[in-house]
Image (spheres, helix red, strand yellow):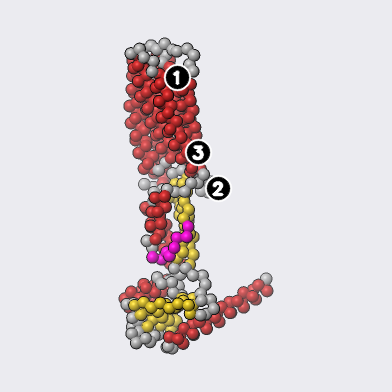
Amino acid sequence: MSLEQQQQEKEKWALGSLLLNIFLTALKFVFAYITGSLALMAEAIHSFSDLVVSLISLISVKLSAYKAKDFPYGLYKIENIASVIIGLFLFFTAYEIIKEAFFEEKPREINHIEYAIGVMVITMITTFIYSRFESKAAERLNSPTLKADAEHIWADFLASLIVIVGLVGTMLGYNLDKYAAVVVSLFIIHSGWEIFFNGLKALLDISLEKEEIEEIKKIVKSYPSVIKIKNIRGRSAGSFKFLELDILMHNYSLRKTHEIVDKIEEEIKKHIPNVSSVSIHYEPERQKGLKLGILVRDSGELADFDSAIKLKIVDINEDGKVERTVEENVKPENLGDKISKSGIDIIIATQHPEDFETRWKIVESGILVWETDKDEKKAIKEVIDSWEEYKNKEKKDDKQNSSGD
């Protein structure tokens, strides 16, 4: 489902909730007036608060997709602001119910209790069905506003159930209204706290869930080109998630690195729902020194790409000294792949590769092929001397440019 389709569906559910609450509020107010039921009047006030909340939900869902010059990242957090407001409305609703139950000076005389019970049964059925469907839609669309609204409607269902118990008790001669009101208030306060706290956490940029972070790490580490994940930062805003990654990668060419990073981003968005953007900052494995690769024959002499059976990898420090040498067995058919993933800067061989695929992988990885007929020690010295000469020239040019400025 595209983001546009998700937006349209969220708006549809928010509008449906608004229409449902208009109907229930009007129904309860009319029959509360006809029957004189205090419990039904309290429920009408409760539904009126639902109506206000639904209006906030609809407005916030519409505004959350809005983008402008002053809000280049969108107004996603309006959904979280709406969730906080909905939570506050739930607290207010609980307060109203308790006030009606315990501080009403003069108890009302109830007429036609069966009408009141009938209205509450209709309310129960409609709120139960709608809240369940809206809750599932909220999970599918990852919308905190729809989830908050579904919880609020579910609280209305529970309140309706308690009111029915109170009305039936009244029919039997027992005054159960105030006790029912306390139970309803506790349910509403619990829902209100969860909705309020979750909305507040998103506004304060709380991190993504631990499970999601671990899944992201698993995706990134599945790429051999990634050496280390230095940092992961993620946050939620409305229905969407925003992610920032700092990773260490092998010394590939800029084009190859960018291609890998794009694939990582696509994979994350594929497996983690509702990720709006992934910002990946990547650094090369080494920013100093030099890594040489040397193709060697069985006899120990330098080889070309077709006759090499070993690859020596030599690390050169900034001072031009050999720090470490590692030797690996290789096969001509996978040599290009091996070299391109080894982080080598220069590969020393008796001649350039003839196979196009091998050539392309080496070029794509930004590796220089140093063709020579000298022996291994002389070839390494030749490369280091040329590298030192290049560095000195670079320093000289920088010095001239600085003095020119």
Residue at x 46%, y 46% (from the top left corner)? 236
Q: Which residues are magenta?
A: 224-231
Which mark, residue 19?
none
Q: Residue at x 41, y 72 (%)?
A: 342
Q: Which circle's residue, 2 or 1, is located before the other in the chain?
A: 2
Q: CA distance from mark 1 to mark 3?
A: 31 Å
CA gap, disc 2 and disc 1? 51 Å
Secondary structure of the residue carrying tag 1 is helix
* Amino acid type of the residue tagged 1 in the rendering: Ala
Indicate the secondary structure of the residue bearing disc 2.
loop
Residue at 42 percent of width and 28 percent of height: 186
Q: Quadrant of the C terminus?
A: bottom right
At 48% from the left and 57% from the top, the residue drawn is 231
Front disc: 1 or 3: 1
- Which residue in the protein does label 2 denote? 69
Q: Residues within 10 Å of mark 2 (few under 14, many from 20)?
A: few
Q: Nearer the viewer, mark 2 or mark 3?
A: 3
Q: Which residue is mark 3?
A: 81
Q: Look at label 3 and name its amino acid.
A: Ile
Q: Is residue 77 magenta?
A: no
| Within-10-Å neighbours for mark 1: few <14, some 14–19, many 20+ | many
Three-letter code, disc 2? Lys
Q: Is residue 51 visible?
A: no
Residue 177 in picture, x, y percent from top left: 40, 18
The crowd level at tag 3 (other Cα within 10 Å; few <14, some 14-19, many 20+) is: many
CA gap, disc 2 to disc 3?
21 Å
Q: What residue sits right under mark 1 in the picture?
A: 101
Which mark is nearer the camera, 2 or 1?
1
Can the viewer see residue 278 in this picture? yes
Circle 2/circle 3 CB separation < 8 Å: no
Magenta span dominant secondary structure: strand
